[in-house]
Image (cartoon, rainbow, N blue to C red):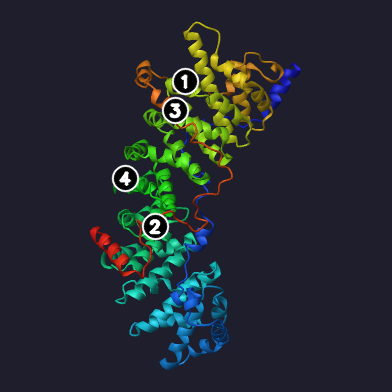
């Protein structure tokens, strides 16, 4: 055995057994999109009920000195809860509620350490004293908004069934506060979320939506419903399915907070399987979500964009439903004018559309996305480039020869060469697969013309492609090595590294090219002049925005450009009346 054969055998022995080839255009659910998870989980999945008077220092009912005095008296208040005299324990309970509603540093731990919580739970059972009951549920709601340990204490006191019972209270304020408490518990962890769901709370929530008209309780219930729909793994489908039809109506009301939370809830549900997505699309919500993408409110556009991105991870029919809502022009505008996170999220949606059937790829190309994505690959930041790379790779992998030739004419080869130096192995393998298909088509075109010149191969070599491929022969990934060696063996015009390659590597590469009929190909042999015209017209629409701050993120509070379309002030009687009117128009 020669030294070369020994070297090759040692290298191949390090490879893992060959597995079924993963499709490059496999739909990706986990994209590490930066919209979410951290501060939203803390600030929105748990909320404390803070008195409006305590929020505003200038109108505060109490001075700092009075608050400090109340804090010093906390042990006395707690001891007073043990009294049998209502005139003693009720004022003490109210003082504790005031302290737990402080905007900064509420004494949650101190109240727990002093042993107040069992008495608060007992007060929950006082059905004949609504004022006492209300103060108690308010206190427990705020404790449940604290740390996981504090929430666990509330759950361990078996408060969930009591809160669920209070959802049927005749007192609307107690109802709302109980919804709030359950929302805080559900927002703590998926175990508590599922525990709350097991009490059939969504049915109680639906009853509230159907019978209550006050904006505050609708707003709180929508937020709690969002908490019940969020978290991974997803809730059982049968538990949250009744909420879908209500959420589809809530996104149509003219109250920003309600629309935002309803939209995020829909985005959470749509991260599930095709069954979850289909249940949402059956409500005919898609046109509404597409319209929300056009809103100036960044609060609303963020979850709407996530919804669209999730919808197109579904099957081909589900993706067609989204495309029929004319979403592509809006996505194009968001990529051209949005921040880095907006562009990344929109490119992710486009990449998943391109992971579909040929007609869907064709729609994306005709809509003018090729020059946009190629421009991103040239000068955008890496997180956005990554999603654009998936979109281009999916176009090449699933597209017809006509589509691939069009991409080549637009300079895709140079952009793919740029991707050969990245560390992400999935993107790297998809890029190599795309390059191989382009070179194979170039070879076929040359043979059809009875020529030995592969124009794509020459362009690839001029872009430094073969040089970069040579370096990938030392890559630690067997898949990357196989793909790189296959390209050099079959398409390199001047293979100088024969000591590293062997024809045996051909057997390790699974060339799986779908047969395309001339009829299918000619069907998409269309006039691309409108796309070329688009590229020329929008040459100046791109600019380097790598240093631009992200436009929207669940990690920050949204500052909207325009607040005229949505009401968000629960104290405004006129605005509440308009919201009520819209709610009444929707038959829950």
**Label 4 crowd bin: few (<14), some (14–19), many (20+), radius 10 Å:** some
Q: Quadrant of the N terminus?
A: top right
Q: Distance between the residues labelled 2 and 1?
A: 46 Å
The residue labelled by disc 4 is 287
Marks 4/1: CA–CA distance:
34 Å
Q: In this view, does 323 lie to the left or right of 20?
A: left
Q: Quadrant of the C terminus?
A: bottom left
How far separated are the C-alphas under marks 2 and 4? Answer: 22 Å
Numbered disc 3: secondary structure: helix
Label 1 vs label 3, nearer the camera: 1
Tell me the SS state at disc 2: loop
Residue drawn at the location 54% of the way across and 80% of the way down:
111
Neighbour tally class for label 2: few under 14, some 14-19, many 20 plus, Cα within 10 Å: few
Labels 2 and 3: the sequence-earlier one: 3
Q: Name the residue under label 1.
A: 405
Query: x, y percentage for residue 499?
Result: 72, 18
User: Mark number for residue 398?
Assistant: 3
């Amino acid at each position: 055995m020669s030294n070369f054969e020994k070297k090759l055998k040692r290298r191949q022995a390090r490879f893992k057994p060959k597995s079924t080839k993963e499709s490059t255009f496999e739909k990706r659910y986990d994209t590490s999109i930066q919209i979410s998870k951290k501060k939203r989980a803390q600030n929105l999945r748990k909320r404390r009920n803070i008195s409006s008077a305590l929020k505003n220092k200038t109108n505060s009912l109490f001075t700092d000195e009075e608050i400090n005095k109340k804090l010093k008296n906390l042990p006395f208040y707690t001891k007073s809860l043990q009294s049998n005299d209502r005139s003693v324990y009720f004022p003490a309970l109210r003082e504790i509620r005031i302290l737990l509603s402080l905007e900064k540093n509420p004494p949650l731990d101190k109240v727990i350490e002093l042993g107040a919580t069992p008495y608060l739970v007992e007060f929950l059972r006082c059905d004949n004293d609504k004022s006492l009951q209300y103060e108690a549920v308010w206190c427990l709601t705020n404790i449940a908004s604290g740390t996981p340990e504090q929430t666990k204490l509330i759950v361990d006191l078996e408060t969930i069934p009591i809160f669920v019972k209070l959802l049927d209270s005749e007192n609307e304020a107690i109802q709302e506060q109980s919804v709030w408490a359950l929302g805080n518990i559900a927002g703590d962890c998926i175990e508590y979320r599922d525990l709350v769901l097991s009490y059939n709370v969504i049915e109680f929530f639906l009853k509230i939506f159907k019978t209550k008209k006050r904006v505050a309780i609708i707003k709180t219930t929508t937020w709690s419903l969002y908490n019940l729909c969020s978290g991974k793994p997803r809730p059982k489908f049968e538990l949250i399915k009744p909420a879908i039809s209500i959420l589809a109506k809530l996104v149509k009301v003219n109250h920003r907070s309600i629309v935002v939370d309803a939209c995020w809830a829909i985005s959470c549900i749509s991260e599930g399987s095709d069954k979850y997505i289909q249940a949402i699309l059956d409500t005919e919500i898609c046109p509404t979500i597409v319209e929300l993408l056009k809103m100036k409110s960044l609060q609303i556009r963020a979850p709407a964009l996530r919804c669209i991105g999730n919808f197109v991870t579904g099957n081909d029919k589900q993706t067609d439903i989204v495309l029929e809502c004319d979403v592509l022009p809006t996505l194009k505008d968001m990529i051209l004018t949005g921040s880095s996170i907006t562009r990344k999220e929109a490119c992710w949606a486009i990449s998943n559309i391109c992971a579909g059937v040929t007609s869907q790829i064709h729609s994306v190309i005709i809509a003018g996305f090729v020059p946009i994505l190629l421009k991103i690959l040239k000068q955008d930041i890496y997180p956005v480039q990554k999603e654009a790379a998936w979109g281009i790779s999916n176009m090449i992998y699933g597209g017809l020869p006509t589509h691939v030739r069009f991409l080549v004419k637009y300079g895709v080869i140079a952009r793919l060469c740029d991707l050969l130096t990245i560390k992400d192995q999935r993107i790297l393998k998809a890029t190599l697969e795309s390059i191989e298909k382009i070179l194979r088509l170039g070879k076929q075109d040359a043979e059809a013309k009875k020529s030995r010149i592969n124009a794509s191969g020459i362009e690839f070599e001029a872009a430094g492609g073969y040089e970069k491929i040579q370096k990938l022969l030392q890559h630690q990934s067997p898949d990357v090595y196989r793909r790189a060696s296959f390209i050099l063996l079959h398409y390199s015009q001047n293979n100088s590294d024969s000591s590293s390659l062997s024809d045996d590597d051909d057997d390790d590469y699974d060339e799986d090219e779908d047969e395309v009929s001339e009829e299918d190909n000619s069907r998409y042999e269309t006039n691309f002049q409108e796309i070329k015209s688009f590229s020329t017209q929008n040459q100046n629409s791109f600019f380097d925005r790598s240093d631009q701050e992200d436009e929207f993120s669940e990690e920050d509070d949204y500052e909207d450009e325009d607040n005229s379309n949505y009401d968000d002030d629960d104290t405004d009687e006129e605005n509440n009346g308009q919201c009520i009117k819209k709610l009444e128009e929707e038959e829950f």
